[in-house]
Amino acid sequence: MTKLPRPLPQTADPQVQKLLRRFRFSLDGNPIYFRTDTTDREVFNDIFVREEYGCAGEDIREPRLIVDCGAYTGYSTLFFLEKYKNAHVIAVEPDPENFELCRLNLEPYTNRVTLVEAAIWSDDSELALHRGELADGREWATMVQPAKNDESPDVKGIDLGTLLRDSGFTEIDLLKMNIECSEREVFSKNYSKWLPYVKNMIVQLHDEHAEEAFFKAMLDYGFLFRRPPTLVACTEISPRAPEPTPGGKLSAKDNQLSNGDFEEIRVAPAQIVPGAWIAGSSDIALDWRVIVSDPQFSVALAVRTGRQLSGENALLIRVIEDQAVLQGTAPYAAIENTTVLFPKPNERWMIRAAVKSSGATASLTRGAYLFLRLYYDDGSSTDLRTEPLMELTEDYVERGGVVQIPQAPPGRILERATLWLYVWIANPGLEAIPAAAFAPWEVLFDDVVCSKI
């Protein structure tokens, strides 16, 4: 017996109906729909294959309310529903065609989803929908603007303060925002009404104006920061402490660091070359300093850009192409974060980083690891290492480990600690290996975090 295909559902929009198709796989047994000849497949790949909204890692635990601003066709909302089984998601989308498909994809989850056909704005406004004017002008690039004199408003604008108040929740555990340049408006005005109630957020910043508004709005907040391609992720958001502890950048109460803190990520690159790594500030993202760097290595803040002006920010350790690795040598680079930490004996600390590598290895040993260096009052120190990262890949992977702070040796007092990154290569062979045989070899550290657990 031949199994007949299930008919496609009927939609309220003839254009959507004409292009409507069903993916061959489902989520929880529920079908997922897309439109042919649109950006739907590309967005689906970004969300479910690349998992770009998983960039906050384990920092977000058991969220109750997620607000998905710019829900498009519902794929990001579906991702959150699957990842956070107990969360309620408010999905906001202004484009009627996108919203119709969003409604269709989220129909099986009506008990966990609130759909809002509107645009996120700085206040409750009447706006005009603009297609084909941003970026490549395709379906994922619909934007809104205040209606001009010759335009009739056709989109309702709503501010996040109103959205939160009407939701019945007291705070937003995760705010996702991809609203096609409207973020510059949202983070420029009236953000004090809702930003204090946001615990974590993932935002796409589309241009320099959006970046400027975003970082200005975040000045009064502390947060752990990640910057995967085209996104910024802020987790554990809280008001900043008034003053840091003398001699250190963080108070003992905060007692954690991240290379994605506000000042560090705003170091301007030397230039922007789409799709390429370029050297940036020699300050190594302000809070990192090179302690040892053998001639084979160079160390810099790197910025990778793509179609968006925003991109990855990372610590880049690269082999210099005209430096050979001599037989029997093991050159290395050691980098210290200048943030002073204040651990106590018997405490457990988590050290982690997103790490990747590129380039051939040509019969040499190479690796990297993070360690916490403890300093005692007599000037001595002890290193607490994590497992070496020997199998680095060209994709970012999160690595690290838990270290336990030991009791100080007799007669010594533990005063402080700092976090270090260490990279080495070794040539155990019988002759020198020219750098050209394995260069470029790069190790990139991003989202380096050290905190008490």
Image (cartoon, rainbow, N blue to C red):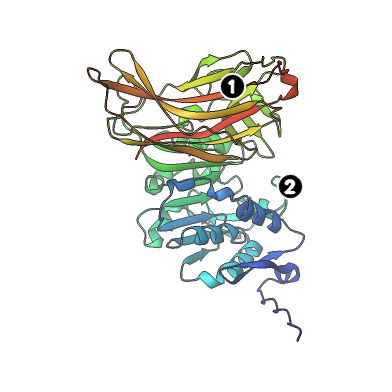
Dividing the image into 4 quarters, which one contains the C terminus? top left
The residue located at (46%, 56%) in the rendering is 66
Give the labeled residue for mark 1: 300
Helix, strand or loop for disc 2: loop
Q: Residues within 10 Å of mark 2 (few under 14, many from 20)?
A: few
Q: Position of residue 130 (x, y in %)?
A: 67, 53
Relative placement, left or right, of 79 versus 162 is right
Vertical comparison of 353 with 292: above or below: below
As shown in the figure, which amino acid type bears the numbered disc 2? Asp
Helix, strand or loop at mark 1: strand
- Cα separation between marks 2 and 1: 33 Å
Q: Nearer the viewer, residue 432 or 423?
A: 432
User: Horizontal placement of 90 versus 43: left or right?
Assistant: left
Q: For label 1, count other residues whose C-alpha is less than 10 Å away and answer few (under 14), some (14-19) or many (20+).
A: many
Image point 58% across, 20% down: which residue? 299
Q: Is residue 143 above or below residue 347?
A: below
Point out residue 275 in the picture as x, y percentages from the top left corner.
71, 34
Q: Nearer the viewer, residue 210 or 153?
A: 210
Q: Which residue is mark 2?
A: 136
Residue at 55%, 58% in the rendered image: 79
> Which mark is first along the chain, 1 or 2?
2
